[in-house]
Amino acid sequence: MKLRHYLLPLLTLLLGAASGCREDELVVPTEYEIIGDEYRDGGIRGFYLVNEGNMGSNKCTLDYYDYYTGLYSRNFYAERNPDVIKELGDVGNDIGIYGSKLYVVVNCSHKVEVLDAHSGIRLGQVDIPNCRYVRFHRGRAYVSSYVGPVLIDPNAPKGAVYEIDTLSLAVTRKVSVGYQPEEMEVVDDYMYVANSGGYRAPEYDNTVSVIQMVDFKQVQQIPVGINLHRLKKDRYDKLWVTSRGDYQYRPSRLYVMQKKPGYNQMVVTDTIPVACSNMAFYGDYMYYYATEWNNYTASNTVIYGIIDVRTKEIISDSFIKDGSEKDITIPYGIAVHPETGDIFVTDAKNYVSSGTLYCFSSDGYKKWSVRTGDIPAHITFLVK
């Protein structure tokens, strides 16, 4: 068993307490834990994990793991930015690194926080209403947005994708898409956006919007499946799209979109008969988990699987081989180290207290786990 050591730096606590901007606010100091899983040979320095925090609690936090030191830092943002009021904000919905900047999408605070990727020091923010996910393309950041207020409403407006100049952090363009857009990807200068229509249930959206990047216009909406969420591309530029179904009669499903000879745009080529909540790619394999809620049975069905992206076949119904999936209450995020193939799975547990991050080797055996903030969800890797 690896040695663990917990540190609560007194200096950090004093600095936080002394800050004039924080005098009416309880500042939780950064905690450090030695994991010891060091990896210095490759091009990855570490990774950031954003903890969503339960809606309304204003408890979005940022953790960081350093492969040089083997040190895990909880609530990293607070220490690096002691003068920022309310810290990151309410519900961290996505995270990404582009160039030297780290972008944290904070959904219910209607903003994207921008940090220096190596120091974690805040550089600024971009105000975007009800923002959801971030992607990058040719010097720009793109953020999906529900546009309207955080509210279930059958008359909720259509969503949009906002374009941000990564140098000035100014919003430069905006395009309307479908209802309540979620994840997106760019392939060959076209952006594909998964529309959910989640605020308009049971009248969900079922389309993927296609945006032509040159003039930033929606040129097509492709019917796929209801209540879409995840949309990620593999190494062959095929798109894998998840449908959450209606939580009762229509189950979650996984769809594949790709170009056919003679077509300029993607078409739906395959429906994989599995539930899928989230996915991550490593080489020719897609690792996925599903936490499928059923309103009728009032219970979750949880699975972990592997799909060969070349053949689109399910090659394993569990990528965890040592039985430790029994320790995971609610899988909520997944990532794969781009060089080692280590698989990371986050556990949201009860959604109101600390979660857990699990690290599995590429052959499915638990290497380590660590306590996180509330609702650990999204990981991005920092290149040296």
Image (spheres, rainbow, N blue to C red):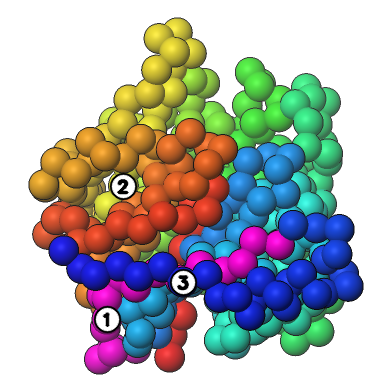
Vertical arrangement, residue 34 with respect to residue 250, above or below:
below
Label of residue 236 in the image: none
Label of residue 288 in the image: 2
Mark yes or no: residue 314 visible: no
Label of residue 38 in the image: 1
Label 3 sits on residue = 7
The amino acid sitting under disc 1 is Glu
Is label 2 or label 3 in front? 3
Are circles 1 and 2 on residues that touch, CB within 8 Å?
no
* Image quarter of the N terminus: bottom left
Residue nearer the viewer, 383 or 161 = 383
Q: Earlier in the sequence, mark 1 or mark 3?
A: 3
Residue nearer the viewer, 243 or 191 = 243
Question: What secondary structure is the magenta-colored segment mainly?
Answer: loop
Decide if residue 120 is on the left or right side of residue 229: right
Decide if residue 337 is on the left or right side of residue 307: right
Please state the extent of the stretch shown in magenta in the rendering: 27-43
* Image quarter of the C terminus: bottom left
Is label 1 or label 2 in front? 1
Are circles 2 and 3 on residues that touch, CB within 8 Å?
no
Q: Indicate yes or no whether the magenta region holds residue 66.
A: no
Residue nearer the viewer, 228 or 365 = 365
The amino acid sitting under disc 3 is Leu
Residue 131 percent location from the top left of the image: 72, 53
Q: Earlier in the sequence, mark 2 or mark 3?
A: 3
- Helix, strand or loop at label 3? It is strand
